[in-house]
Amino acid sequence: MSRNKKIIITCAVTGAIHTPTMSKALPYKAEDIAREAIEAAEAGAAILHLHARDPLDGSVSLNPDHFSAFLPVIHNATDAIINISTGGSLKTTIDDRMAPASAASPEMCSLNMGSMNFSFHPLADKYTDWKFDWEEEYIRSSEGYIFRNTFEDIAKVARQLGGEHNIKFEHECYDVGHLYNLHHCVRNNLFKAPIFIQFVLGILGGIGAEIDNLVFMKRTADRLFGSDYQWSVLGAGHAQIPLATQALMMGGNVRVGLEDSLLYARGELATSNAQQVGKIHRIAEELGYEIATPDEARAMLGLKGKSQVNF
Ligand code: KMH
Ligand code: ZN
């Protein structure tokens, strides 16, 4: 790859997998989500991928008011691109999942490109003293969870959030079949180029976090989308930094953050999102890559602009 291409770092700040018991660093109050996001941007993240939590007990929330409690704070403190999740939680419908992005009209939102088992139930056996009552049942019940993202759901999100709000998608692809789903949608003109693909490796239910799998995903995307796409990699758990490093060397962008891994290194919890961003930032620079500013990322992804949001 050309060393002139700049690297977009996404930081996914809190997510819907981990719970407060698992790490003191995982933010769930609005002021903590805002601070973590702002510090991640200062450490080099051009995109902030955001979920909200109930500030009282840290459970996953799709209440637009919980998003409004931190979105303007982040917007005013940084130039970073705000990306609102449409991934939802274990018992939410596609309409619930679109509500926060519909209200806020951010520059980007996530869009998950296929239905699948999506489970993190093995985490439950690692903890005995839970901070909040909901956590253990939430984690264990993911064993029976089907993450629904049908073609009908995808088209609805594309029309409502892409069409009406001109929001660019982070297309989360958890397996090779999801690339073919995306290709089908692109051929049906649901999305504008350049598309932005997030290869997601290491989620139980999706493709494993192996270098061979990343190479296969990338080669498949090249075949389907030619050169008119941007891509990034998210490795779950301890695969986060190794796979991000591999992505850098293959010409891709990277995603880190406590949503996908609570670790700074094997066996060592991260103390903040910014710590993970700082680590991949340093690795990228050591390898000779430059980091994209938010405005450079906006140009690379063809975004509507920071002033076009509703918060
Ligand atoms: N934590 C990722 C593996 C979404 O927000 O739409 C899944 C995710 C889904 O980021
Ligand atoms: Zn997410």
Image: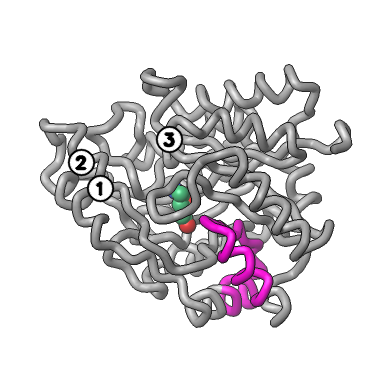
Q: Quadrant of residue 22?
A: top left
**In the rendered structure, which segment of residues is drawn in magenta?**
158-185
Which amino acid is tagged 1? His
Please check the rendered image and state whether residue 182 is part of the magenta-colored stretch, yes or no. yes
Q: Which residue is mark 1?
A: 121
Nearest the eye: 86 or 245: 245
The dot on residue 237 is 3
Q: CA distance from mark 2 to mark 1?
A: 6 Å
| Rendering coords of residue 140 (x, y %) | 19, 50
Q: In this rendering, is residue 83 above or below 149?
A: above
Kindly state the secondary structure of the residue where label 2 is placed: helix
Nearest the eye: 295 or 115: 115
At x 31%, y 47%, the residue is: 120
The dot on residue 46 is none
| Rendering coords of residue 293 (x, y %) | 74, 36
Q: CA distance from mark 3 to mark 1?
A: 14 Å
At x 63%, y 57%, the residue is: 107
